[in-house]
Image (cartoon, helix red, strand yellow):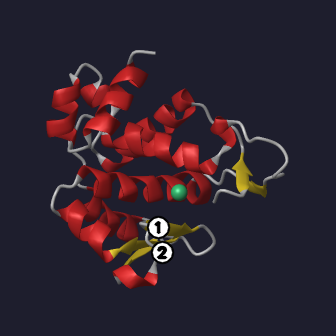
Amino acid sequence: MHDYIVEPLSRLNIRQIVKAFRKFLGIKYESYVDVTTLLDVLSKKFKGFSYQVVANNTMPKKVFATTDINSGKIRIKQKIFDNACDGDGFGRYCIAHEIGHFILLKLCGFELAKADTHIITPKYMDPEWQAECFAGEFLMGYDAVKNYSIDELVTKCVVTKKAATYQYNMFRK
Ligand SMILES: [Zn+2]
């Protein structure tokens, strides 16, 4: 969705949305979110949501998953899905990122517009930045883990060291 812009959302806006979403799922204070199981939960809870695990060769090398906002369908590369099931932080983050697209664009209905390629998009209007922000906030829920160390975030939230370090700093801004 690099050619698109979306209504502006700050990290604090996204944190509030995540808070409501986690509360709705009954996981407000959970440090660990089982994202692969959550895909099945979301399929049951939301009519407009579905997901499919697809063969590795059906997506380009650097694409790990996609979300079709019109149909509400998330497609996940087999390898990424399997890794996420095995507790790989990167795979888990990819899936949380796509869930972020669904929640922000489909469920909350923030509108996408075609970006003017001559103007640099501010990051808070970039749907990719918003989904990355959602993934970090969702996997490391503020109310649950805001006082964790980086190592605690890595082991208890099952995220990469890079994601944990970034989120650790965001909690202290
Ligand atoms: Zn994305």
Q: Which mark is residue 105?
A: none
Front one among 123 and 6 = 123
- Dividing the picture into quarters, in which one does residue 40 lie? bottom left
Residue shown at the point (41%, 45%) measured from the top left: 135
Q: Which mark is residue 60?
A: 2
Residue 130 left/right relative to 78: right
**SS for callout 1:** loop
Q: Identify whether 93 is placed above or below 78.
A: above
Residue 155 image offset from top left, x and y in percent = 14, 38
> Which residue extends farthest top?
172
Q: Identify whether 123 is placed above or below 146.
A: below
The residue indicated by pointer 1 is 63
**SS for callout 2:** loop
Taking the image as drawn, is residue 54 in sight? Answer: no
- How many circles with numbers are drawn on the protein? 2
Residue shown at the point (35%, 80%) measured from the top left: 56
Give the residue type that dot 1 points to. Val
Taking the image as drawn, is residue 112 in sight? Answer: yes
Gap in Å between the C-alphas at discs 1 and 2?
5 Å
Q: Quadrant of the N terminus?
A: bottom right
Residue 148 left/right relative to 116: left
Residue shown at the point (63%, 72%) measured from the top left: 70
Residue 88 left/right relative to 67: left
Residue 24 image offset from top left, x and y in percent = 38, 47
- Dividing the picture into quarters, in which one does residue 26 lie? top left
Give the residue type that dot 2 points to. Pro
Q: Identify whether 45 is placed above or below 158.
A: below
- State if disc 2 and disc 1 touch (CB < 8 Å): yes
